[in-house]
Amino acid sequence: MCRPDHFAVEYAINPWMDPGAGADREVAIRQWEGLKSAYEGLGHRVSLIDPLEGLPDMVFAANGALVVGGRVYGARFAHPERAAEGPAYLRWFTDNGYDRVHAAASVNEGEGDFLTLDHVVLAGTGFRTDVAAHAEAQEFLGRPVVTLRLVDPRFYHLDTALFPLDGRNVAYFPGAFSAGSREVLRHLFPDAVIADADDAAVLGLNAVSDGTSVVISAEASGLQLELKRRGFEVVPVELSELRKAGGGPKCCTLEIRG
Ligand code: ARG
C-alpha cells in the first residue's frame, strides 16, 4: 500500500475526477488508515512503498504491478501523469529481493486490469491496458490470460467492475462489459454474484476478498447483503474521498502472491 501523503485530484483521467472540486487529503489519509487497519485486523501483512511528491495517484497501488507466483510483471501507465509510478513500483520489488521482474513493453496498469484466480488471470482492456499486454503477461507468468472488454468509461479498469470472491468465482457488474465478454463471464462463472448499477456506482466491485472476508465500500449495501447470504464475512470501509479520484479499496491494494 502507499499512504496518500501527496493525494490530490489535480487532473482528470477518468470520469470520477473533477480537479475543480478537488479532494480533502486529510480525510483521504484517515480513510486509508482505516483500510490498512482492516487488513491488519484480518491478519494480513501490509508492506508500504514511500509515496512520491508529484504523483497524486500513487496511493492506487493496485496499478503498480501484477505479482503471480513471485513473478513481478511491471506496469506501464497509459497516461503521462502517472508514468513515473511504473519504475517506482518496480524498484520497490527489486529493492525487496524479488528477482523475477519483467519491465513491460506494452501499456498495462497492473492489478487495475489483471485479476488472478486459481486457473486463470482475467484481464481488462478498452480504456487503459493494451490487449498486447495480455499476451505479454501470459508469456511471462505462464498462466492463461482471458481478455475482457470494458465499454463504460466509469469502469475504466477491470477492478472497478469485477472482483474475485476466491480462486474460483467472481462478482461483477455486467453493464461494464461488451456483449461478448458478458458471455465469456457467464460461461466461466455460472454461479457469479451479479451486482447492480447502484452497487457499481459506489465502486462496490472494487473490493478485496481473501476467500473468507470481503473488504468492500461501506455504501455497497445490496452487494454486501448477497455476500453475507453466501457466507462471506463483510468488512465495510469508507473511502469516499479516494473515490473522488475514481478509486476504492482494491485500487489502494496491490496483492503480492508468493
Ligand atoms: N485516478 C486513478 C486513475 O485514473 C485511479 C486509479 C484507480 N485504480 C484502480 N485500480 N482502479 O488512474
Image (cartoon, grey):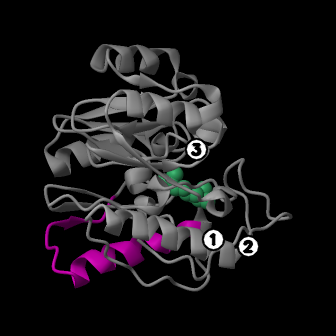
Residue 224 visible in the picture: yes
- Which stretch appears magenta? 82-104
Image position, residue 80 (x, y; %): 59, 66
The reply, left or right, for residue 19 in relation to residue 216 is right
Q: Which residue is mark 1?
A: 28
Q: Are marks 2 and 1 in contact (CB under 8 Å)?
A: yes
Closer-to-camera residue (102/167) = 167
N-terminal-most mark, 1 or 3 = 1
Q: Which residue type carries mark 2?
A: Asp
According to the picture, the residue beneath numbered tag 3 turns out to be 203
Q: Is residue 167 magenta?
A: no
Give the residue drawn at x 41%, y 63%: 38
Q: CA distance from mark 1 to mark 3?
A: 16 Å
Q: Which mark is residue 52?
A: none
> x, y percentage for residue 226?
45, 28
Sooner in the amino-acid sequence: mark 3 or mark 2 = 2
Residue at the (21%, 38%) spot, across then down: 167
Classify mark 1: residues with Cα within 10 Å, few (<14), some (14-19) or many (20+): many
- Report the amino acid beneath label 1: Ala
Q: Quadrant of the C terminus?
A: bottom left
- Residue behind mark 2: 24
Is residue 58 visible to us here? no
Q: Secondary structure at mark 3?
A: loop
| Crowdedness near tag 2: few (<14), some (14–19) or many (≥20) residues, C-alpha within 10 Å | some
